[in-house]
Amino acid sequence: MQDFESLSVFCENEDELGECPLWHAKSDSLYWIDWCRNILYRKKREGSSAEHIQLDRNIRAFAFCRSGDLLLNLNGGLSLLNWENGELHEVISLSLGEEEQNVNDAKCDARGRFWFGTISSSGKGRLLRFDPADKSLRTIREDIHTSNGIGWSADGEAFYYADSGKKIIWKCAYDLETGELGPFEDFADFSSIDLGNPDGLAVDVEGCVWVAMWDGKCVLRISETGKILRCIDFPVMRPTSCAFGGEDLKTLYVTSAAVDLEPQPAEQVLRSGNVFSMKVSIPGVPVAECAI
């Protein structure tokens, strides 16, 4: 059975580096960022155009909060944003290491802890966990190249984590009560496969991982045992991330990038940077809010 239907353009946005799509059920809207231009967008499912907030700091990811605010992952720390009035308040500061260039993708577990990582061209980046209960920030792993997609299985017992630079997705047992990870196991290794680099990801209710493949011109659906079940061709070279949305969580939204592209066919250049959508037959796991 085919697990997706036709692909369409959700927003003609021409993002330099569209990233971090997140579905907000309460407003029936998709939010995402342009990583290069420090813009946060939102667009209603049936809306005609996207709204945006231009930030004067480097936004790299975000999460929705139980309070209604957004927690922004900025170079320099985590801050709360009120979309309606634009007010920004720092929650915790973060100093990047000498060999770290940026913070990057993020996601919250079902207890509202905020997980994110950093980028280090020398492979000395970190995976970190912020716990709003005591405002603690803990380093979980310190040998990361390009921290990217994060997700959990529907029961919260499996943690998925992509390092684009190492071309791998890891899988760990997850203790939801404590936020502790088990050993990192290779889930999907792309080092010897010509499909690009794993970027942002989402998980469906059957335990399969959907991952956007940077420089691979595709989105993959991977079984919970690590087998590639589907390779969905995209009209852009650089899909960047994906998120389930819509009223039944059966729409997959996919961001893309136009930055630093080599010469491409005209139709790819025109579509790069857009946000795409496609109907799928398997609903996604809802993404949790931060416990703030």
Image (spheres, helix red, strand yellow):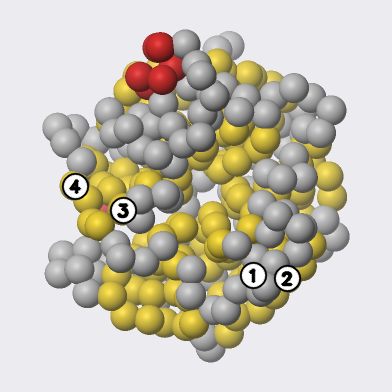
Q: Are marks 1 and 4 in contact (CB under 8 Å)?
A: no
Report the amino acid beneath label 1.
Answer: Leu
Q: Secondary structure at mark 2?
A: strand
**Comes first in the chain, label 4 or label 3:** 3
Q: Gap in Å between the C-alphas at discs 4 and 3?
A: 8 Å
Considering only vertical position in the picture, is 231 above or below 52?
Answer: above
Q: Are marks 1 and 2 in contact (CB under 8 Å)?
A: yes
Q: Are marks 4 and 3 in contact (CB under 8 Å)?
A: no
From the viewer's side, name the closer residue of 108 and 53. Answer: 53
Badge 2: few (under 14), some or many (20 or more) residues near its Cα, within 10 Å?
some
Q: Gap in Å between the C-alphas at discs 1 and 2?
A: 5 Å
List the residue tagged with mark 4: 51
Q: Gap in Å between the C-alphas at discs 1 and 4?
A: 30 Å
Considering only vertical position in the picture, is 158 above or below 6?
Answer: below
Q: Secondary structure at mark 4?
A: strand
Report the amino acid beneath label 3.
Answer: Leu
List the residue tagged with mark 3: 40
Q: Gap in Å between the C-alphas at discs 1 and 3?
A: 23 Å
List the residue tagged with mark 2: 140
Residue at the spot x=77%, y=58% of the render? Answer: 123
User: Residue 244: x and y, percent?
Assistant: 44, 38
Residue at the spot x=77%, y=45% of the render? Answer: 166
**Comes first in the chain, label 1 or label 3:** 3
Report the amino acid beneath label 2.
Answer: Ile
List the residue tagged with mark 1: 128
Q: Secondary structure at mark 3?
A: strand
**Comes first in the chain, label 1 or label 2:** 1
**Quarter placement of the C terminus:** bottom left
